């Protein structure tokens, strides 16, 4: 997906929370969203500010969190947010923005529960594309002991080979016995080669 | 371990995608670029301030011929700021050089090594790419390729 698509974004009623590590980056990000027409932007420089916003009762349509906060505090913030049972913000789309990512942070970024990680620099084009992608997000939400957030599987390939799936809808790789009569060739052709119906 | 629970949920951002109203990509990008221009000067000042701090840290490392943990961490943080801001106002190559410096420092920290010369080359690269129009594109590309090669050679 890219900014050349003819999709339109109307963010005038969206409420956005921005948590960035320094003022200059926060200002750039804020200006990008002002340009996109967002009226309600909460800009936070510290975790305390961001947590106050979350706890204030405001409901955010989009949360953007800096990966580059000291000690990986941004990841911890996302993890806590995803585990806030009863909070409307628990299910908010969350985008992480990251500069250089140390090896130790890659797994944390994947497992904290964010919807997406975007590499800096954050230009308007990159941000527009990613917001559009997030708006079209249809992955399910997963709650488990070790992870809470959007399904990390972007495609359904089933559980890894040799492992039993942990989800009720995970299908075994082993084929069972046929449950009914074989389909006729006509039935198969009809499935693979649909024709316009004459009504 | 409990099995995972999965459920569908309402994506609140979904309602912002529309076929009518709102902004097309071209309109949104134009408006956002204009809005971002308002912070051009303070951002460039912040980039220069970060670069000055990096150069200062480099000088202290040169004198000590060592990179203490605090100085390395600070250099990494400053370089990461340049990564974040460089590309917004036409300094994408400067941002890439800063990214290479982050990679180098990260590898020094992980592997517990230090070679000031590799830092020095990166600082020279940053100085050169801060004013990209002063140098031909071929030179800039060569510098960037060299920096990447140096950073990834530490293993």
Image (cartoon, coloured by chain):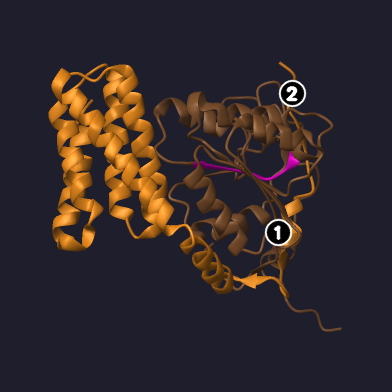
Q: Chain of mark 2?
A: B
Marks 2,1: beta carbons within 8 A:
no
User: Which hue is chain B drawn in?
Assistant: orange
User: In front of the other: label 2 or label 1?
Assistant: 1
Q: Is A120 left, or right, of B67 in this rendering?
A: right
The residue carrying mark 2 is B3
Q: Position of residue B30 (x, y in %)?
A: 52, 71
Residue A48 drawn above or below residue B12: above
Q: Chain of mark 1?
A: A
Task: Count all numbered tags in the image, as a single digit.
Answer: 2
Element type where label 2 sits in the image: loop
The magenta stretch spans which residues? Answer: A91-97
Q: Give the residue drawn at x 32%, y 35%.
A: B102
**Number of the label disc, if any, that sits on residue A39:** 1
Name the element at disc 1. loop
Q: What is the crowding at mark 1: few (fewer than 14 residues within 10 Å), some, or many (at least 20)?
A: some
Apparent side of residue B43 relative to residue B28 in the rendered image (left or right): left
Quadrant where the C terminus of chain B is found in the figure: top left
Residue B94 at x, y = what percent? 28, 50
Horizontally, is A56 left or right of A18 in the view? right
x 40%, y 28%: residue: A103
Screen quadrant of the N terminus of chain B? top right
Nearer to us in this view, B11 or B135: B135
Asked whether residue A184 appears in the rendered view, the answer is: no
For image coordinates 21% across by 48% down, the residue present is B144
Q: Residue at x 19, y 55 (%)?
A: B141
* Circle 2 residues within 10 Å: few <14, some 14–19, many ≥20: few
Chain drawn in brown: A
Point out which mark residue A67 bears: none
């Amino acid at each position: 997906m890219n900014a050349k698509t003819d999709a339109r974004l109307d963010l005038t009623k969206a409420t956005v929370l921005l948590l960035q590590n320094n003022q200059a980056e926060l200002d750039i990000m804020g200006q990008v969203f002002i340009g996109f027409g967002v009226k309600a932007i909460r800009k936070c420089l510290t975790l305390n500010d961001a947590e106050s916003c979350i706890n204030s009762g405001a409901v955010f349509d989009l949360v953007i969190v800096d990966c580059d906060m000291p000690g990986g505090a941004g990841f911890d913030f996302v993890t806590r947010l995803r585990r806030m049972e009863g909070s409307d913000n628990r299910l908010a789309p969350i985008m992480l923005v990251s500069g250089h990512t140390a090896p130790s942070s890659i797994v944390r970024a994947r497992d904290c529960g964010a919807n997406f990680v975007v590499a800096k620099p954050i230009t308007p084009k990159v941000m527009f594309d990613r917001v559009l992608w997030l708006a079209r997000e249809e992955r399910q939400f997963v709650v488990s002991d070790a992870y809470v957030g959007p399904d990390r599987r972007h495609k359904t390939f089933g559980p890894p080979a040799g492992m039993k799936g942990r989800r009720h809808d995970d299908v075994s790789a082993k084929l069972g016995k046929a449950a009914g009569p074989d389909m006729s060739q006509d039935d198969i052709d009809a499935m693979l080669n649909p024709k316009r119906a004459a009504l | 371990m409990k099995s995972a629970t999965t459920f569908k949920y309402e994506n609140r951002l979904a309602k912002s995608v529309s076929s009518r109203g709102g902004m097309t990509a071209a309109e949104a990008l134009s408006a956002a670029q204009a809005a971002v221009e308002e912070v051009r000067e303070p951002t460039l000042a912040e980039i220069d301030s970060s670069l000055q701090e990096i150069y200062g840290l480099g000088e202290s490392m040169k004198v000590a011929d060592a990179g203490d943990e605090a100085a390395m961490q600070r250099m990494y943080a400053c370089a990461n700021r340049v990564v974040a801001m460089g590309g917004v106002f036409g300094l994408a190559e400067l941002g890439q050089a800063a990214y290479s410096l982050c990679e180098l420092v990260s590898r020094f920290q992980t592997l517990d090594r230090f070679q000031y010369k590799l830092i020095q080359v990166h600082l020279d690269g940053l100085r050169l790419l801060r004013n990209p129009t002063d140098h031909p594109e071929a030179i800039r590309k060569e510098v960037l390729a060299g920096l990447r090669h140096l950073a990834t050679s530490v293993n």
